[in-house]
Image (cartoon, helix red, strand yellow):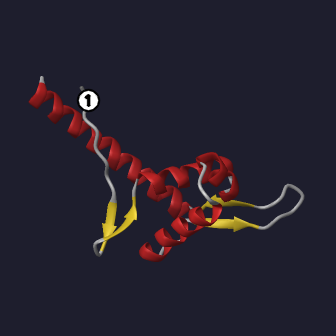
Amino acid sequence: MEVKSKIWLEEGGELVFGEGKYLLLKEIEKTGSLNKAAANLNINYRKCWAQVKAIEDRLQVRFVEKIKGGEQGGGTVLTDKGREFIRKYEKLTAGMNEIVDKRFNKVFN
């Protein structure tokens, strides 16, 4: 048996950020493209764009920047603030999972 937990962030009672949005931003970071990220996650492009805009609107911070086309085409990259935010989320979730795992082992073992 193992324990599972989910962590999400809210602002004013509204969901701002969680695992799904984290995975989307990580995929954008990896691929350099919102379109490729959407395809890799099997999510509609418009839904992905709406999720990014929702994060940005609620936190009043730009998380992604569009790169206009050229020889190699355009793309979408994370801003410095976007990268910093996902790193902080990673630290938070890693620490929380460690605490939950320890508590679980103490209670059930």
Q: Position of residue 15 (x, y in %)?
A: 36, 66
Q: Secondary structure at mark 1?
A: loop
Left or right placement of residue 107 versus residue 62 in this view: left
Query: Measuring 50% from the left and 50% from the top, which residue is drawn there?
Result: 23
Looking at the image, residue 6 sits to the left or right of residue 26; the answer is left
Badge 1: residue crowd in 10 Å (few <14, some 14–19, many ≥20): few
Q: Which residue is mark 1?
A: 2
Q: Name the residue rendered at 23%, 33% in the picture.
A: 101
Q: Quadrant of residue 33?
A: bottom right
- Quadrant where the N terminus sits is top left
In percent of width and height, residue 77 lies at 65, 59
Q: Give the residue type at disc 1.
A: Glu
Residue 25 x %, y %: 54, 55
Q: Please indicate whether residue 65 sits to the left or right of residue 104 in the image.
A: right
Most foreground residue, 23 or 70: 23
Residue at (55, 50) in percent of width and height? 26
Quick one: which residue is furthest to the right in this view?
71
Above or below, 52 against 42 in this view is below
Residue 88 x, y percent position in the rendering? 40, 53
Q: Quadrant of the C terminus?
A: top left
In this picture, residue 2 sits left or right of residue 65 = left
